[in-house]
Amino acid sequence: MTARPHDQALLDRAKTRIPGGVNSPVRAFRAVGGVPVFVSRAEGAYLYDQAGRGFVDYVGSWGPMILGHAHPEVLAAIHAAVDRGTSYGAPTEQEITFAEAIGALYPAIEMMRAVSSGTEATMAAARAARGFTKRDGIIKAEGCYHGHADLFLVKAGSGLATFGNVDSAGVPAGAAADTAVVPFNDLPAMERALAERPVAAVFLEPVVGNMGCVPPAPGYLAGVRALCDKHGTLFVMDEVMTGCRVHKGGAQALYGVRPDLVTLGKIVGGGLPLAAYGGRRDVMEVISPVGPVYQAGTLSGNPVAVAAGLATLARLDDALYAKLESFGARLQAGLEAILREKSVPGVVQRVGSMFTLFFTEKKAVHSWDDAKGCDTARFGRFHAAMLDADIYLPPSQFEAAFISGAHGDAELDRTLSAARNAIGA
Ligand code: PMP
C-alpha cells in the first residue's frame, strides 16, 4: 500500500478541531478503512492531493460535477458573478431565469423555491406537504436518504410499517413518530403503510443512490403514483441526486412518472450551495408569503451559486448524456467481465452515469435487505487497492459512483486495468 504520510498528518491535525477530521461523516473513510485524501484542487476528471498526485474521480463531489471539475464556462460564470458582489438578500432576475430553466426541464415544477442544500429542500418539501394536506404522516423507503432533518432520520422497525424509530441520537422520538419506513420496491408494503394512517407525503429517491445504485423495479414508481392518488397523499420525488443525472429531466422524465413535489440539489447548483424544491402550483402556494407555511434563507438564491447553476444547466445537452451513457456502458461491461474472469461474486448496477459494484452473491440488489448482505470487507479491500492505483471511488459499498463528461478513454483504461488487479487481489 502506498503510504500517504501528508494525508495522515492532515487527518491527525483535523481531528483535534473537527469531529472525525471531516465536515461530513462519509469523508472520513470509516466504511472502508484507510486515510482520506485531502484535496488541494480538482480539474476535469481528476482530484489532486497536496503532493500533486492525481486521482481519477468517481465521486464528483457526491454528484454535482457532471461536467467535470473546474469546467471553464462554469468558472467564467462564477468569476463574472463574484465581480457583481456575492450576496444581496434581495431578489434578482437570475433567480427567475433559474426557476424558468428548472421549470422547462421539469414540467412537474410549476413553482419552486431556491434553498442552499438538499437537506433544506427535503425538509421544506415535507413542511409544504404537511401544510397543504393538513396531515402529519410521512412515508420513506429503507435505504433512501433525504438529508439530515429530524423527520427523515428514522429507521424501519420490526413491523413492515412501524412508525417512529429514531436513527440518530439527538432526534426526539416525537420528531420521528410520524415517519413510517417501508422497503424500497415493495408496493404491497407501501399500500399497507398508506392505509395505516393519513399520510401527507411519500418521499422516494426514484433511483436510489444512498444504498448504492438501486433502480426502481418496472412499474414501481407508477404504482406509488397510483397509490398516492388513491389516498390523497403527495408523491415527492427526491431528485437531489438523480436530477439532471439519470436524464436531463431527472428520473421523472426517464420513467415517465409525474410527482407532486420535487427536490433538486447537487447538479442544479453547479458545485455551489444551491438546491430547490418545487412542484404543483396549488401546493407551492402554501409557502410564505403567499400561504401559511414558513420557509426562508439568508443565502437562498445566492447570486454566485445561481450563476454556477445556470452555467451548468446550459451545458446539459444530448451529446453529454450520450457520452455518459457510452462511458457507463463500457465501464459496466468491463467490470462485469473482470468479476467473471476472477470468479468473484458481484453485480454492477447502473442507470446512466451513476453506478455501484456490489460484492454480493445475489443476481441483483433491489432493496436495503439485499444491499446490507454485501461483502463490505471485500469492498474495503477493493477500495484501498483502487485508491493505490489512483482511482478515487466512493468510500462505502453503499454510495453510488458518478461519471462526468470529462471522463474519457484514458480514464476508462486506467480504471479497468486497476480494477483487474484490485478485484483479483
Ligand atoms: N437527498 C438525496 C437523495 C441525497 O442524495 C442527499 C445528499 N447526498 C440529500 C438529499 C441531502 O443533500 P445535502 O447533502 O445537500 O443536504
Image (spheres, grey):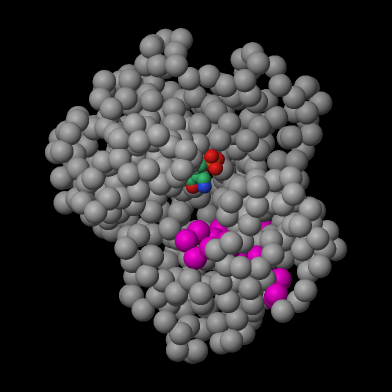
State yes or no: residue 424 in magenta: no
Whether 360 is drawn above or below 327: the answer is below
Query: With 260 as the anchor, is 94 left or right in this view?
Result: right
Placement of 315 over or under 397, stated as above or below: above
Residue 48: image x %, image y %?
Answer: 78, 60
Q: For the N terminus, which image quadrant?
A: bottom right
Residue shown at the point (61%, 68%) measured from the top left: 33
State which quadrant residue 227 falls in. Answer: top left
Q: Position of residue 24 (x, y in %)?
A: 61, 47
- Whole-percent x, y for residue 412 in the image: 63, 72
The image position of residue 215, as x and y in percent, is 36, 58
Q: Which residues are magenta?
A: 388-409
Q: Magenta span has 408?
A: yes
Q: Residue at x 48, y 71 (%)?
A: 376
Our reading of the magenta stretch's main secondary structure is loop
Residue 58 left/right relative to 79: left
Specify the quadrant of the image occupied by residue 209.
bottom left
Residue 29 visible in rendering: yes
Using the image, determine if residue 56 lies above or below residue 224.
Answer: below
Tell me: 302 left or right of 380: right
State which quarter of the image contains the C terminus: bottom right
- Residue 141 visible in the displayed image: no
Image point 43% across, 77% down: which residue? 346
